[in-house]
Image (tube, coloured by chain):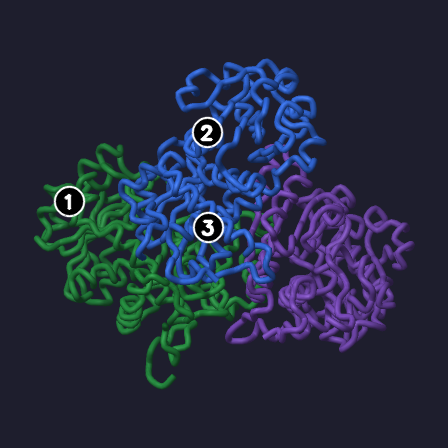
Chain colours: A blue, B purple, C green
Amino acid sequence: MGDYIFNQNHLLGIDHLSDKDIDTILETAESFVEISTRDVKKVPALKGKTVVNLFFENSTRTRSSFEIAAKRLSADLINFNSSVSSLKKGESLRDTVLTLEAMNPNIIVIRHSASGSPHYLTTFARSSIVNAGDGFHEHPTQALLDALTMKQVFKTIRGLKVAIVGDILHSRVARSNIILHRKMGNEVSIIGPPSLVPREFEKMGAKVHHNIEEGVKNSDVVMMLRVQSERGAGNYFPSIREYRKHFAINKKVFAMAKKSAIIMHPGPINRDVEIDNTLADSDKSFILQQVTNGIAVRMAVLYLLKGDFNEPIN
Amino acid sequence: MGDYIFNQNHLLGIDHLSDKDIDTILETAESFVEISTRDVKKVPALKGKTVVNLFFENSTRTRSSFEIAAKRLSADLINFNSSVSSLKKGESLRDTVLTLEAMNPNIIVIRHSASGSPHYLTTFARSSIVNAGDGFHEHPTQALLDALTMKQVFKTIRGLKVAIVGDILHSRVARSNIILHRKMGNEVSIIGPPSLVPREFEKMGAKVHHNIEEGVKNSDVVMMLRVQSERGAGNYFPSIREYRKHFAINKKVFAMAKKSAIIMHPGPINRDVEIDNTLADSDKSFILQQVTNGIAVRMAVLYLLKGDFNEPIN
Amino acid sequence: MGDYIFNQNHLLGIDHLSDKDIDTILETAESFVEISTRDVKKVPALKGKTVVNLFFENSTRTRSSFEIAAKRLSADLINFNSSVSSLKKGESLRDTVLTLEAMNPNIIVIRHSASGSPHYLTTFARSSIVNAGDGFHEHPTQALLDALTMKQVFKTIRGLKVAIVGDILHSRVARSNIILHRKMGNEVSIIGPPSLVPREFEKMGAKVHHNIEEGVKNSDVVMMLRVQSERGAGNYFPSIREYRKHFAINKKVFAMAKKSAIIMHPGPINRDVEIDNTLADSDKSFILQQVTNGIAVRMAVLYLLKGDFNEPIN
C-alpha cells in the first residue's frame, strides 16, 4: 500500500484519531451504506478473518450491530460470552485475552466496564482492538455513526453546532462526541443539571449549560442522552418528572434550534422521559438512521483495520 | 416473476394462508428435504440475506431449527437474544423491532408470549415476519411440518381424519393444525378433558370428544400434545396419573385408529405421561421425522419469502 | 479411499484410539496449524457440513475453540445451548440428542458432567460424536493438543517423561493424558497429596508421587493442573497456602526437571497458586501454544471424522 489510507492498528477512542482518520472512516462508511440495501448484502472483504465479540456488559444492540457488520464483510464472527467464561473462575482480563489471542483472531471487539481496558489490551495483544464502550470513557463507533448521520444530513461534518443533553458525566457516548466535534472544529454545548454536567467539561472545549433552551439555541443537532434509571441515574436529580420538566426535548425547546436542525439519540429511548413521544417519531428524528449507519461505520472500521486495500471491496 | 408462486410477504399463521399457499409451501419443502441428506447440505438460495431469530421465549429446538434452515440456504443468521436486550431497559417491542429493522434484516423470526405480536409487527416493519409461536394463538411452521409428514406417509394432505389429544385450549400447535386441516377439508377430532377441550372449538369445525377411544376411532393421524407440567397444566386435571389413565395414547387406544394410522407429537415428549414409552419408539411414531421436516419446511418458508424464484435453488 | 487414514467414527476418548490413530491426528493437526496463521484462515474442507456444540457444562474456551475450528473448515456451527433447552422440561439426554440428530448434523461435540455420556450417544446416534469432556472421565482433544505441543518442542511424542501435578483424581485432562502417554510408551509421573493422587492410578501405568521434587525429577514435561477452588477442591487439602507450599511449580522445583523441560497447563491458570507468576510467563511455559494447538487439533479431528480425504484440504 503506497499512500496513506488509515494508519491505526486499533480503534480505542476518538481521542486517538486525527481529523483525517475520522474523514477516512466516514468516507469508507459512506461507500458501505449501500451494501446493506442490496439484494445480496455481502462482500468478501474480510473472508477468512476472525472477529471476536468480547462483551463484558450486556448489549444486544451494539453486539448484534458488530455481528451483522462482520458477517456482511464475510468474516467469521465469534461471540465470546464472558458472563459464562473463565472470568467466573477468577481469571484476569489479561489472561482471558491472551488465551483468546492464542486462537489467532484478527480483531477483538471489547465492551468492558473499566475505562481504559481496550487501551490496556493493546499493551500485550497482537490483534486489532476495537473499543465498543469502556466504562464512562469512550464509545468511538457510536460517535462515528452519529457523525456519519450528520454528514448525510448536512453534507459536511464541519461548521456545525452540536448540543448534547443529559447525563454527560456518565456518558461515554457524550465524551466521544465532544472529542470528535471539537476535533472537527464544531461548537459543542452540553446541557443538564449541574450534578450531571459539571464545569470541568469546559476543559474539553464544550460550553456548559444548565438551561436547555439556552444550550439548544441555534444548534444544528440536538443529541439527547438516555436517562439510565436502571443504573441509578435518579440519584443525581430529584425525580424523573422534575428531570423531564427541565431537560426533555419537546417542540417548544426544539424550536430554539435552527430550522434545519435534527434530533439524535443513541437509544434505547425512554419515550416521554428525555424525549417527547411525537418528536421521537417525527421527520426531525434521525434515531433509526443512526442505527442503520452503525452497520456501515462498523463495517468501515473492521475493513480499515484488517481489509486488503488493494482488492476492490466487492 | 410471471405466474403465481407465493403472494405472502409474511408467515403470520395458517389462518392467513389459502389452501393453494399451503400446497406451495409443502411442495417447496418436499424439494428441500433432500438437501439435508446431501454430502454438502447447503445451497446459495439466500446468500447475502440476513435472518434474525428474535425469541422472547426459550426454545432451543425451534430456534435451532430456523438457524440450521437459514444456514443451509446460505443466509446470515443472527440470534438476537432478547433476554439480555434492551427490553430489560424498558424498551417497547415496537422500538426494539424498529431498531432491529434499521439494521436491514430480510426476515425476522419471532416467538413471543403475546398472541398477535407477529401481526402487530407487520403494521410497521418492512422485513418479512415469520411467526415461530405467539402465545396461545398460532405456530404455523409446526402445523406445516406436521402436514408435510402426513403428506409423505399418505401421499396426500387431503381426505384425512386427524385426531388431536391433550391441552387444546393452551396449544398454539393445536390451533394451527385445526385451521390447516379444516382448510384442506380434513376431519378433525379434538380430545381431552372438558377443562382443556371446551365446546367453543366446534366453531372452528373440529369435533369435540372427551373420550379418547371415541375420538381416535378411524383416524389416520393421532397427534398427541405435550402435558406442560412446567406451565401449570396440572391445574386443569386432578393428577398426571388420572390424566394418563384417560388421555394417554397406548396400544389399546391406538388400535381404535385405522390400521395405517400414525402417531405424531410436537415434542418434547413426556414418556409414559401422554404417550406410552414403547409406542413412542415404534414404527408407528413419526415424531423424529417431524423434526427432520421442520428444517425443510422452514427452509421453504424462508425461501418463498425472500428467495429469487428465477434462480435454480442449487 | 484406499489405504488406512482414520478408521474411527467418533472421538470418545484416548482409550479408544490406537497409537497409529494418535499419530494420524497429530500429523493432520500439524498440517492445519499453518492455516490459522494465513491471511485467509479458512479452507473449504467441511463446507456444507453441520457441527453442533452441545455443551451441558459452561466452557467458553473449549466451546469457542471448537467453533473457530469448525468455521475455519467452512462448516456450519450451531451452539445448542442446553441450559435453556428442553432438558429443563424434563427431556432425557437420549431424546434431546435424537431430536437434534433428526436435523441431520454431521458431528455432535458434547460436554456433559456424566462420565460415559459420549459413548452412550454412539449407541443410538448416526452423527459422529466428539467428547469435549465427560465428568471425571476423559477430555481427549485436550490430551491431543498437549501431545501436539510436546511433539512441536521435542520433535517426537515418544520417549518422553511426563509429570502431571495436581488433582489427578477429578481431572479428565489428567486421565486422557495418562492414557495417551502410556500408549506412546512414555513414562508418566503423577504428583499430589494422597487424597487427590491415590495409589489406584498405578494400575494405569503411572508412577504415584506425593513429593513434587521427586516426581518432577528428570521429566521433559511438567503439566500443572488447575486447583478448582470453585468445585470444592479445598475439601481435599488443608488450605491453598498449604497446597501451594507442597505442590506448586516454582523455579526451585522446576530445576529438578531436565534442562530442556517445558511447563504446560490446560488453563485457566491460578497465578501464584499452582504456578509461580513469573514461571507462567517465562519461555519455559507453553500454555498459550497449547491454546493455539487446540484449534489445529480440533480442526484435525473434525476433518478426519467428516472430511473427504480425496480432496485437497485447501
Residue C269 image offset from top left, x and y in percent: 28, 43
For mark 1, does the 10 Å Cα neighbourhood hold few (<14), some (14 to 19), or many (20 or more) residues?
some
Q: Report crowding for label 3: few under 14, some 14 to 19, many 20 or more residues within 10 A (C-alpha).
A: some
Location of mark 2 (residue):
A178
Q: Earlier in the sequence, mark 2 or mark 3?
A: 3
Q: Are marks 2 and 1 in contact (CB under 8 Å)?
A: no
Q: Residue at x 22, y 45 (%)?
A: C192
Q: Are discs 1 and 3 both within one chain? A: no
Q: Nearer the viewer, mark 1 or mark 3?
A: 3
Q: Do labels 2 and 1 share a chain?
A: no
**Front-lying residue, A53 or A250:** A250
Disc 1: host chain = C
Q: Report which quarter residue B21 is drawn in.
A: bottom right
In screen coordinates, is B166 left or right of C237? right
Is label 2 or label 1 in front? 2
* Three-letter amino acid code at the position of disc 3: Thr
**Residue at the spot 87% in from the left edge and 63% down from the top edge:** B214
Please give the chain letter of the residue carrying mark 3. A
Residue C44 appears in view: yes
User: Which mark identifies residue C211?
Assistant: 1
Distance in Å between CA atoms under marks 2 and 3:
22 Å
Type of amino acid under label 2: Ile
Q: Element at badge 2?
A: helix
Q: Name the residue under label 3.
A: A28
Kind of residue at badge 1: Asn
List x then y, in percent, for residue C188: 19, 58
Residue C248, horizontal then vertical, whole percent: 20, 41
Category of crowding for the residue at label 2, using alpha-carbon neighbours closer than 10 angstroms: few (below 14), some (14–19), many (at least 20): many
Query: Residue at coordinates 83% horizontally, 46% vertically from top-left?
Result: B195
Q: Which of A235 and A137 is in front in this view?
A: A137
For residue C170, say whether it is visible. Answer: no
User: Which of these two is toward me, C107 or A176?
Assistant: A176
